[in-house]
Image (cartoon, coloured by chain):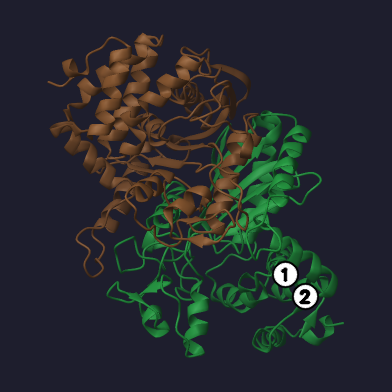
Chain colours: A green, B brown
């Protein structure tokens, strides 16, 4: 089912307005979801709308949060997200933080009392537009065991960063700290396929290629103990330091409908002008990008990509030609539209 | 060959004093190297002394650098290392940065014109002692190709972080962004052994298990494209942003004796008191550590470790029982001693 991105954004926005979000807030969430689809990261795109609506309906999410600074210093902000959607809370945090970074050179932003924030790249992109280097991290509900363990403790805690360039596309990288999204294991189980070694362990902590056993066990961190350490660090910064939940104390977006998730985020913004003039910095980044792109290629490789470059290419392509949604996702959106008395077909021109 | 750590430090210090370092500077480098041995990270321990001395003799390293702030803002420091040894430059940077972090809540520290800094954990430990969360990153001479390429561009750019705890040992993590140290491939080649798949590619960019072909090729980043992205990010922060060399423009510690390495580092310090009282934060970290340590273990696992915990255990053990150096390392130190008219045997009680 084919949509142009602006129309798909309008649909998501209109559904969320019916759920009580202000036009501004609904537009932020719509922008985040559809941008993920544009970048080819469909797992974080409009497929999430039904669960977001369900959480809004349950009362566990504040539709129009009062996002407030609860503690600050020249280089730091601690922000309370008032239980709002992470996209809204994070966007306000970037606004507040960018101002501070430009005044003082950089800022560390801790955010508590938030909810699933979609993709980290969404916030990083906002900061890059102002010549800031940005990092966005978040904790998430438990799905990974500590290295050597079997019970889920850490989330697939995402890590994103962005670096502005001038002639070239900016560098935007966004990853989960798990080897693979749990959703891919679910797909394998539904298709009756085996999963590759190294994706998951069963409930006894043994490596498994059986998707069903994997779903009863936990997904593994990327890069073994190194990924475990990075996931832990993200939880320390996003959870322990901010006052949000951490470890197994972050509530599940797909359950726990009686209470807020209390997710925490940690953002870092750096004004490059406090190190060298932005033009000079971006020219150095352009030189790095050029050198990498011109680097000799390994056998069978057609092009060397910068981190996030494939997603930029997807974004350009889908902005022009539109986004195709699978039947299942389309049907779920159509149902959300019907509940809100909005006909999705009106957005499909 | 057996040494107690304080004696081994004294030997390294005395050799470096003969090379023209002040007692204070020589002690910093000795502390860094021997601490690596104590932690069990022998690859970054006293085995490095001969190459350090060789670089000092070549004139490419400033023995007693004038480490200076060249640009600053409330949240940022740009520091010129004056071509000094990274341990000395980095230690002064932590001193300057800790003061600023306590005043303003946090600081981003860029360092240019430095040299190989040993281990990142050395700096992180200094910061933890003052209730700061710390990150230490550095670029390094080219040994890894961009993902899909064959020519070395990035270094094995290290990434370290530290988090203070109260009842438990602090969390200190320190990793290279390569799968494995190049030294391990050299050892395999010398022993006529194959290397595991995934460690390296040959000069055509093909995966190889032949150690000789691997040495003519390049080591791979940890976690494939994710490690490539993280290594690139470290180079952007340490090199492109600071004015140090980046990519293939960082000079080799084992060659390029006619010029400084121009390595760059990037440190981040965060005063936890700007987010919550330090006691409260450390108690939350203790809770996280306790929950992880008590977590059910996978089949065959005897204990779940926190990042860096094994190195702490090594440190405790070797502090008490001493450090054993292999014959080859001992002989190389003995030769350095002889050149400096210092008898290593006098330090072996």
Disc 1, disc 2: CB below 8 Å? yes
**Residue drawn at the location 29% of the way across and 28% of the way down:** B34
Q: The numbered mark 2 sits on a residue in which chain? A: A
Residue A340, percent from left and from top: 71, 82
Is B14 situated above or below A287? Answer: above
Is A73 situated above or below B189? Answer: above
Between B204 and A66, the one lying in front of the other is B204
Which quadrant of the figure has residue B39?
top left
Residue A196 is marked as: none
Q: Is residue A307 visible?
A: yes
**Residue drawn at the location 64% of the way across and 30% of the way down:** A104
**Residue drawn at the location 51% of the way across and 24% of the way down:** B100
Between B222 and A139, the one lying in front of the other is B222
| Residue designated by label 2 | A8
Q: The numbered mark 1 sits on a residue in which chain? A: A
Crowd band around label 1 with a 10 angstrom C-alpha radius: few (<14), some (14–19), many (20+): many
- Local secondary structure at mark 2: helix
Give left or right: position of A32 versus B289.
right
| Residue designated by label 1 | A34
Counting the numbered discs, the total is 2
**Residue drawn at the location 62% of the way across and 70% of the way down:** A44
């Amino acid at each position: 089912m084919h949509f142009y991105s602006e129309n798909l954004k309008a649909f998501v926005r209109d559904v969320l307005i019916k759920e009580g979000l202000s036009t501004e807030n609904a537009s932020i969430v719509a922008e985040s979801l559809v941008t993920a689809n544009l970048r080819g990261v469909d797992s974080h795109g409009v497929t999430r709308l039904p669960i977001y609506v369900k959480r809004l309906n349950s009362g566990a999410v504040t539709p129009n949060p009062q996002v407030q600074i609860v503690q600050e210093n020249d280089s730091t902000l601690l922000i309370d997200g008032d239980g709002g959607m992470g996209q809204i809370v994070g966007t306000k945090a970037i606004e507040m933080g960018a101002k501070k970074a430009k005044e003082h050179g950089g800022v560390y932003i801790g955010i508590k009392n938030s909810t699933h924030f979609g993709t980290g790249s969404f916030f990083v992109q906002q900061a890059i537009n102002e010549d800031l280097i940005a990092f966005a991290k978040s904790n998430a509900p438990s799905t990974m065991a500590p290295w050597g363990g079997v019970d889920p403790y850490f989330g697939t805690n995402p890590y994103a960063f962005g670096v502005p360039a001038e002639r070239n596309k900016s560098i935007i990288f966004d990853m989960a700290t798990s080897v693979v999204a749990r959703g891919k294991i679910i797909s394998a189980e539904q298709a009756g396929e085996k999963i590759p070694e190294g994706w998951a362990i069963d409930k006894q902590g043994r490596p498994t290629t059986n998707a069903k056993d994997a779903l009863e066990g936990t997904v593994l961190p990327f890069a073994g103990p190194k990924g475990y350490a990075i996931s832990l660090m993200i939880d320390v910064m996003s959870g322990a330091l901010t006052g949000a939940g951490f470890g197994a104390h972050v509530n599940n977006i797909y359950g726990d409908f009686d209470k807020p998730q209390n997710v925490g985020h940690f953002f870092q913004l750096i004004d490059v002008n406090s190190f060298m003039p932005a033009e000079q910095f971006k020219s150095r980044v352009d030189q790095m990008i050029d050198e990498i792109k011109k680097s000799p290629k390994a056998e069978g490789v057609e092009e060397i990509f910068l981190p996030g470059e494939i997603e930029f290419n997807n974004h350009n392509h889908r902005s022009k030609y539109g986004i195709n949604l699978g039947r299942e996702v389309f049907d779920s959106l159509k149902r959300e539209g019907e509940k809100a008395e909005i006909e999705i077909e009106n957005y499909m021109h």
